[in-house]
Amino acid sequence: MVTGVGPAKDVFRPFAQPLIFLFIGSFMLAEAIRVHGLDRRLAYAVLAQPWVGEHPKRIMAAVALVCGVTSGVISNTATTAMMFAIVSGILAAIEQADQGEGGRRLNPRFATGLLLVVAFASSIGGLATPIGTPPNLIGLAFIEKQLGIDISFFSWCLLGVPLTLVMLLVVVVVGTSLFPAGVSRLEG
């Protein structure tokens, strides 16, 4: 090796671990989603649903759902970064519509709550699948190496998905309780 750390064979041996290629694949998937705008399309498609409409609590639930589902298939850190930009745009549009009606009616704490929901829902969604967050893969490799127990992708999901859904519901309830919008409906 050029730096004298060790022979190339020994230095690059950890990169032959199959989990490294799963990491690389999830990062490639996240970049492809960003490049093609699928993240924005997903968010706007959910927000355009009739059940979401102009209701702040439902908007918060929809954002949590999008973050949770997305971070289940790509890194939760990448999901947070993508959704932060999208939610910032949504909040700017809401603020503009709110001020256009002759005075501020929306509680400014709602924006704080919505951004916190992005962070928490993305972290929680990462628990749904083994590829949702890098520590899941590290933990799976450790369990297999130390205990000889092989946990399949779907076995993980049998526990992870229901647990994630319950925790997302808790985040939405807490978020809407601690950071109310102050209005029951947002025009526009």
Image (tube, rainbow, N blue to C red):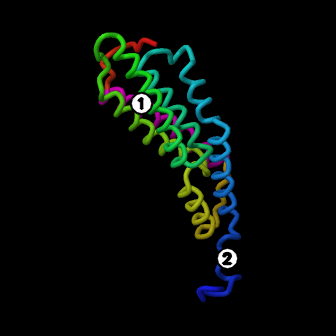
Measured as percent of width and height from the top left, residue 16 is found at 71, 70
Above or below, 4 relative to 119 = below
Is residue 186 shown above or below 29? Answer: above
- Which residue occupies 56% across, 19% down? 48
Residue denoted by label 2: 12
Q: Residues within 10 Å of mark 1 (few under 14, many from 20)?
A: many
Q: Nearer the viewer, residue 154 or 178?
A: 178
Q: Secondary structure at mark 1?
A: helix
Q: Nearer the viewer, residue 149 or 75?
A: 75
Q: Check disc 1 and give the amino acid type.
A: Val
Instruction: Using the image, tell me which numbered label, if any, was put on residue 172.
Output: 1
**Residue at 59% over, 58% down:** 137
Alpha carbons under labels 1 and 2: distance apart = 44 Å
State which mark lies toward you, 1 or 2. Answer: 2
Label 2 sits on what residue type?
Phe
Magenta range is: 154-179
Residue at (38% x, 38% y) in the render: 116
